[in-house]
Image (spheres, rainbow, N blue to C red):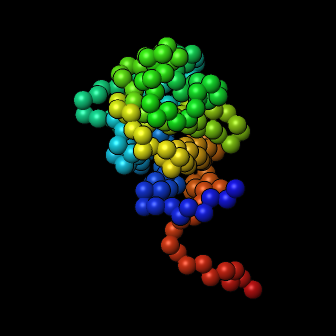
């Protein structure tokens, strides 16, 4: 089904930031990725927004934006088999949990490093189908107004991050071909003769 929902200002800003030309360094360390995570966290009223990488049996926090009273360092790693994100990738856990603490209380999920109310996670899948890791947002309090719109935004962000990683790996410059153009530039058609 075709989604006719027009992008809002946050979607446009995220796209602008993440399709910026790679500068030859690690694309996740680019300041634009940090700004995107900060925007997601702020607008979705989350305590943490982060990008992970699945590497050598670990889930490594590659980039993070978090509330001032939290201190999860970039580079922090947990065993992949214990990770909620891995459960999402494996299809054992939905991408959106409005009240994750209820699952922890019932023993259906292991406790996290802090109480988790709302949990949103989606895989970062590269063009060859390989799962790089995830993009996640977590709030300590359950938020019943977080839903499909926020999940779609996170999925779009994950796709753009995957494109950024692929572009850097391929050594090419510019956005991936399948990234939507939400610019306001007029289109005059083909002027070649």
> Foreground residue, 86 or 75?
86
The answer to whether 66 appears left or right of 26 in the picture is left
Is the N terminus in the top left, top right, bottom left or bottom right quadrant?
bottom right
Q: How many marks?
A: 0
Residue 177 shows in the view:
no
Between 168 and 54, the one nearer to me in the picture: 54
Residue 127 visible in this rendered orientation of the protein: yes
Which residue is depicted at the point 52% across and 36% down? 96
Q: Residue at point 34% right, 46% down? A: 42
Residue beneath the point at 64% across and 40% down: 126
How far across and down, in percent of the image, does residue 23 sit?
A: 48, 49
**111 to 192, vertically: above or below:** above
Location of residue 1 with respect to 72 vertically, above or below: below
Question: Where residue 134 sits in the image (x, y, percent)?
Answer: 54, 34
- The x and y percentages for residue 63 are 42, 35
Q: At x 46% / y 18%, what residue is drawn?
A: 104
Classify the position of the C terminus by image quarter: bottom right
Residue 44 sits above or below residue 81 on the image: below
Outermost residue toward the bottom?
193
Q: Which of the pair 43/157 is nearer the observer?
A: 43
Q: In the displayed image of the protein, which residue is found farthest to the right?
A: 193
Quarter-of-image position of residue 76: top left
């Amino acid at each position: 089904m075709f989604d006719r929902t027009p992008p809002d200002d946050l979607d446009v800003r995220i796209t602008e930031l993440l399709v910026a030309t790679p500068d030859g360094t690690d694309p996740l360390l680019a300041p634009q990725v940090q700004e995107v995570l900060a925007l997601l966290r702020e607008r979705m009223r989350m305590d943490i927004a982060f990008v992970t990488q699945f590497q050598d049996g670990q889930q490594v926090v590659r980039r993070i934006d978090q509330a001032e009273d939290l201190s999860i360092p970039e580079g922090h790693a947990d065993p992949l088999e214990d990770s909620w994100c891995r459960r999402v990738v494996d299809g054992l856990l939905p991408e959106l949990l409005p009240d994750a603490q209820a699952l922890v209380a019932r023993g259906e999920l292991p406790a996290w490093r802090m109480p988790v109310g709302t949990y949103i996670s989606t895989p970062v899948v590269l063009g060859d189908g390989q799962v790089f890791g995830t993009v996640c947002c977590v709030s300590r309090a359950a938020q019943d107004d977080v839903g499909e719109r926020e999940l779609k935004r996170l999925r779009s962000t994950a796709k753009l991050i995957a494109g950024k990683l692929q572009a850097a790996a391929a050594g090419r410059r510019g956005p991936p071909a399948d990234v939507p153009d939400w610019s306001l530039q007029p289109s005059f058609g083909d002027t070649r003769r």
